[in-house]
Amino acid sequence: MTQPDTSNSDLDTVDERDVVGRVLATDARRASGYTVFGGESSKSSKSSKSSKSSKSAGSGAQALQTDAHDDGDRDGDQFDREDRQALRRVGGLSTELEDVTEVEYRQLRLENVVLIGIYSQGTVSDAENSLRELSALAETAGAVVLDGLLQRRPHPDPSTYFGKGKAQELKGVVAATGADTVIADTELAPSQRRALEDIVGVKVIDRTAVILDIFSQHATSREGKAQVELAQLEYLLPRLRGWGESMSRQAGGQVGAGNGMGSRGPGETKIELDRRRIHTRMSRLRKQIKGFAPAREAKRANRDRFAVPSVAIAGYTNAGKSSLLNRITKAGVLVENSLFATLDATVRRSTTADGRLFTLSDTVGFVRNLPHQLVEAFRSTLEEVSKADVIVHVVDASHPDPAAQLTTVRSVIGELDARHIPEIVVFNKSDLADDDQQLLLRGLEPRGIFVSARTGDGIDELLERIAELLPSPEVEVSLLVPYDHGEVISRLHVQGRVISTDYVEEGTRVTALVHPHRLDELRQYMTA
């Protein structure tokens, strides 16, 4: 939402004795021209065919749709989204004070970032799509993207990531835009990060750090928070840095050379102590995450006991997985136009047109170059995909590079050993894709289904396809069930398909289709 422009004359109208009014008026003036998450000005510009991809402070990332709609009847009250928005940092509220009276009213400053990336193969358009996705990640984490730089070279520079000339150009861009952070579109080695920070003079982080920051903001459950903390510690461990003499816990100089009295220091250096503490904390987190497994396994065993098939919704982040779950089941899951809005798996039940019960699971989204720490930490959550009977693979039909989304998600599914599970490719947001885009998508996946969680188009076709792929009862049996065993009839309706029912003096005569593994428990009721 674009902040209203407040002219200098507005400040004159504020009573000089009204400190709060003067501070708010000053902040409004300072915030003019900035756009935070949406607004008309956040539509991204078209790809330029140069090595420099420039973004103004008022533009948004292409990976985030500007036309974000939600349906209160379908998506619920969305209280979680209101809570999250209430804590989001707002552009223009800064820690730099113009007046000492503002000290009680200062707010957390929004980070201004410059994006950098290197590509060795492919086109400039592909590299810019990756940089736009990084821009969307930065905006989701709570930053304003000011500019971006791309360089084509066979390999990143082993010392500074960028070449020497490009690193100096980056230093000039940072100084000109007033940026305070540089984000690299890859995972940087600790030495590369330190060397680049020495050149540009501001904080340098990488794509992995941004994704971990988003996960840390959005994790809500105990298991989700533990998984994110474990991933953060795994990322932090090789990147611990010493800060001068304060890190030293050993005696130095001639004393430290082992020459007699006074040569034995306290033992560990502080950095070694920090490493040991991190290893201890990681060990506790792994045990804690394992402790969540029995409850999850008990729920899954309960569904298996009643032979309830499961359908997992997987796909790229911000492809509309939660919106699709809400459209089908009215689950009321958090829906937000941002990346990784939901991290915890949500399971809801639904039924096919012929009355068969199945569960529908919404899982965490994927992204290209997904940090391996997150894949390992969230493996327990991603088990919903590997244990499913059918995978609904959701692709954003309006995305500029849908082929990369398909490849990325299928790669992660392969890591989970789930390639053998039947897959339904769903092109969501079809209402935002024109005819040419739909023709391109049809070429990528001929059997793909075009749906719109917003309008409801294609949902019936998707449910029909799910019903076709779900394991169905295939053995016909004739049963005579006594009236005092009514639970058997109830279970037949849930786990099988009842063909006919007749009430006789001895009990209920039923003809039904059941799964082969249920024949043993029904054998006592079978009739010739």
Image (cartoon, rainbow, N blue to C red):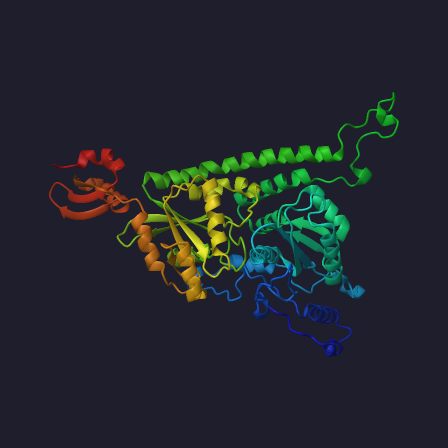
Nearest the eye: 84 or 341: 341
Q: Residue furthest top?
A: 260
Residue 382's spot in the image, x, y percent?
Answer: 47, 43
Q: State the image quarter where residue 389 is shown.
A: top left
Say if 182 sits above or below 432 in the image.
above
Q: What residue do we see at 43% from left, 60% from top? A: 440
Q: Is residue 481 left or right of residue 110?
A: left
Can residue 283 be seen here?
Answer: yes
- Indicate the quadrant containing the C terminus: top left, top right, bottom left or bottom right: top left
Q: State the image quarter where residue 285 is shown.
A: top right
Q: What residue do we see at 68% from left, 40% from top? A: 239
Q: What residue do we see at 71% from left, 42% from top? A: 191
Can residue 330 be seen here?
Answer: no
Q: Is residue 386 left or right of residue 526?
A: right
- Indicate the quadrant containing the N terminus: top left, top right, bottom left or bottom right: bottom right
Q: State the image quarter where residue 486 is shown.
A: top left
Nearest the eye: 364 or 206: 206
Residue 108's spot in the image, x, y percent?
Answer: 69, 58
Nearest the eye: 205 or 171: 171
Say if 428 sits above or below 219 in the image.
below
Q: What residue do we see at 36% from left, 40% from top? A: 302
Residue 294's spot in the image, x, y percent?
Answer: 45, 36
Nearest the eye: 523 or 464: 464
